[in-house]
Amino acid sequence: MRGNITMKDIADKVGVSSVTVSKALSNKEGVSENLKIKIKKVASEMGYRFNSAAKSIKDGLSYNIGVMIPYRFTGVSDSFYLRMYQQIAIHLDHYGYFGILNILSNEDEEQLNFPRIYSEKKVDGIIILGQFDKKYIETVKKMELPKIFLDFYDEHADIDSIISDNFYGAYEITNYLVQCGHREIAYVGNIHSTSSIQDRYLGYYKSLLEHGLAYDERLLLNDRDERGKFIDIQLPEKMPSAFVCNCDQVAYNLCERLTSMGYSIPQDFSVVGFDNDIYATFANPQLTTVEVDIQEMALTAVKSIIDKVANPNRRNGRILVQGKIIYRDSVRVTNPPVNSPPK
């Protein structure tokens, strides 16, 4: 495709006017969201390149969006947030924006330092990906630019957030364990660590209540310290028949631990996870888990932050993105569920 693609070329391809294309590419009102996405997709496929420098001078915007992640969520074994950032960057490109990844060091978080991309005014808005310390969130609140929380929320209801439906996902997967005949079910996760872990615990707890199963505090098993570093899980003396883990990495670690002790999964214990990340397929057997819709969460975050850049007073509140259970082989079925998963 030739390099000098014009708005008229795009308009002819889509079947709209050049004015409509111009409005869509500039995120102006008067064009539906679906048509904007279609026009930007066609523009990208045709090789159209936004002149960000010229637009910046004209509009007073940088056409950059910052994505800030705490350092502790970016280790070699932490793929979830980097995968999320990849999807954000792809969707931002379709809107003519660049994503700037900012890894906030533990030191800067502790000392409540603003990220350089903010202090040097290099971004028009910022996506805070992954839960920060409460004191640092107060720092974020003082940033005078559009911002959203992604994959967590907290008491600051005035900051929009986009999260997976953690409560319902954990509720559903615990229901599945109960339907399979399990009556003693543990939850593995530090419920004081993140809002996601806490909501998943609450979904697990609601399932127990609805099925008349007694909650046993000894079956709430801690998996990490207050900084998010994994610790050895202290297994109870009287073991449950199943474990609901707050994420796939913890479920994988637990399976490895139980296997090293001479147990078999799922013959001796059933284990389920959350996220459907790489650890779900590393495990042997592979994990039944709740799949988080990373692509939909990233797209929703991008739409939300760009909308807030154009309309700083716009409020979207808390948006839930639904996940789904992925059925694999880590659950032992003693009573077949009424609605058995497809094989």
Image: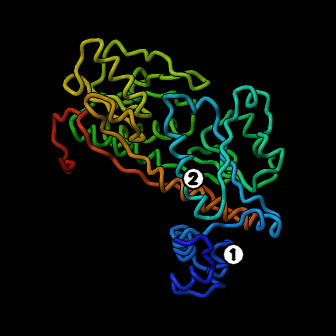
Residue 341 locus on image (x, y percent): 21, 48
- Seen at 28% across and 42% down, the residue is 176
Q: Nearer the viewer, residue 104 or 255?
A: 104
Give the answer, above or below, for where 37 lies relative to 211. below
Q: Label 2, secondary structure: give it.
A: helix
Q: Quadrant of residue 322?
A: bottom left
Q: What numbered label is drawn on residue 28?
A: 1
Q: Is residue 154 left or right of residue 115?
A: left
Give the answer, above or below, for where 90 lies relative to 277. below
- Seen at 31% across and 17% down, the residue is 258
Residue at mark 2: 88
The type of residue carrying mark 2 is: Ile
Tag 2 and tag 1, C-beta contact below 8 Å: no
Q: Is residue 30 left or right of residue 266?
A: right
Q: Label 1, secondary structure: give it.
A: loop
Residue 83 locus on image (x, y percent): 50, 44
Q: Earlier in the sequence, mark 2 or mark 1?
A: 1
- Seen at 57% across and 32% down, the residue is 74
Q: Quadrant of residue 21?
A: bottom right
- Seen at 57% across and 52% down, the residue is 88
